[in-house]
Image (cartoon, rainbow, N blue to C red):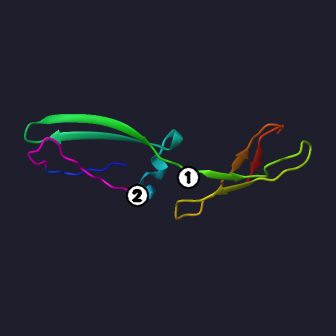
Amino acid sequence: YLMHALVPINVAPEEHVKMTYTWREYLDKLVEQAIIKVFVLAHVDTTKQVWAGQDDFRLKSPGLVIEGPSEMTVGQPSFVTVKFTNPLDVRLRQVEFRIEGPGLQRPKSIP
């Protein structure tokens, strides 16, 4: 995704430029761990100077709420409830919760 803006900079020791984009514009460009990598190149026409910088930001993912009984009995089935709030305005597809814990022979997948 490329954003381009010509920004006039006033005579000041510091200037801020704000660029906004929506989740629809960056969602398919996220890398591992929901990280956005940002590269900035600044070119000053009057002095012909160029600056480059980069940074990355990790997006905060919504948490899971796990509720279960306060006590469980060995050898007896137990139930837990997992809640997740979708922060996006689109339906999520192919979502899978993987539940692991002491005493489970294999991780249990719940489609």
Find the distance from the CA under tag 1 to the CA under tag 2.
17 Å
Percent from the top left, x then y, of residue 32? 52, 39
- Relative side of 31 to 7, left or right: right
Q: What secondary structure do most residues of the magenta stretch adopt? A: loop
Q: Is residue 28 above or below residue 105?
A: below
Q: Earlier in the sequence, mark 1 or mark 2?
A: 2
- Give the residue pinned by disc 2: 22
Percent from the top left, x then y, of residue 91? 59, 63
| Residue 12 is covered by the magenta coloring | yes
Task: Mark 1 vs mark 2: give the one in front.
Answer: 1
Say which quarter of the image contains residue 20.
Answer: bottom left
Q: Which residues are magenta?
A: 9-22
Looking at the image, the residue that sits furthest to the right is 75
Q: Is residue 85 above or below residue 100?
A: below
Say which quarter of the image contains residue 105.
Answer: top right
Percent from the top left, x then y, of residue 7? 17, 51
Tell me the amino acid under the disc marked 1. Answer: Pro
